[in-house]
Amino acid sequence: DTEVTQTPKHLVMGMTNKKSLKCEQHMGHRAMYWYKQKAKKPPELMFVYSYEKLSINESVPSRFSPECPNSSLLNLHLHALQPEDSALYLCASSQPTRDTEAFFGQGTRLTVV
Amino acid sequence: AQSVTQLDSQVPVFEEAPVELRCNYSSSVSVYLFWYVQYPNQGLQLLLKYLSGSTLVKSINGFEAEFNKSQTSFHLRKPSVHISDTAEYFCAVSGSGGFKTIFGAGTRLFVKA
């Protein structure tokens, strides 16, 4: 199994809503990532978890709250988002070393209205 | 610090023609280089990678890239493109801060019939 599964695929939420994005992998990877990607731009790193501990937070606003319940799961909790947060949110996983590639999910297309 | 420069934002090419997508990098540590492809409304997939050894690396679908240390380049080539190769291509380098990946801005390859 070389897949990273993200749910939901599409999400529309109001600015007062609370929602969560979910990500799952069963490749035994111990690093998991959240990226945000705007149209025609490269992915921007948001958070990195290594061995289920948050190791990188790229100064992301607190309305985004990551959670790593175990080595296979990664969540991104969303609250009080702004329309400019609309984007494709990508989850990825890898071994926690430099000489390895990341495996990406298909992404969640988020629209904030 | 690491950085990646993709010199072309868009490359239009006719079907069955050769193509080269250019990538230059800078790195203060040992270099691990990657090319990822992103088809519309999907996540990123690894196309090929250079870790060490032979400087010419190949993918299963006919792409190849050559690591050139003196020119700090990792250009992607294909001798004959297909319509299905239309996608966004990202060059990436493994960051020195743990396993953070640094992406280039991306090159959109558009194959015309």
Image (spheres, helix red, strand yellow):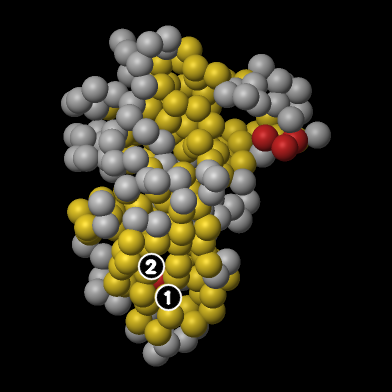
Instruction: Name the residue tied to disc 2.
Output: A75
Mark yes or no: residue B98 visible.
Answer: yes
Q: Position of residue A99 (x, y in %)?
A: 33, 30
Measuring from the top left, give residue B23's x and y in whole percent. Answer: 43, 27
Q: Position of residue A18 (x, y in %)?
A: 40, 84
Judge by depth and name the residue closer to the eye, A9 or A38. A9
Report the side of A49 relative to A1 (left or right).
left
Residue A26, placed above or below residue A112 = above
Residue at image location 39% in from the left, 90% down from the top: A16
User: Mark 1 packing: few (<14 Cα in 10 Å), some, or many (20+)?
Assistant: some
B52 left or right of A55? right
Question: Label 2's element?
Answer: strand
The tag earlier along the polypeptide, 2 or 1, is: 1
Which is more toward the observer, B75 or A94? A94
Task: Give the residue drawn at x 42%, y 51%.
Answer: A92
Tag 1 residue: A20
Out of A70 and B35, give the one closest to the viewer: A70
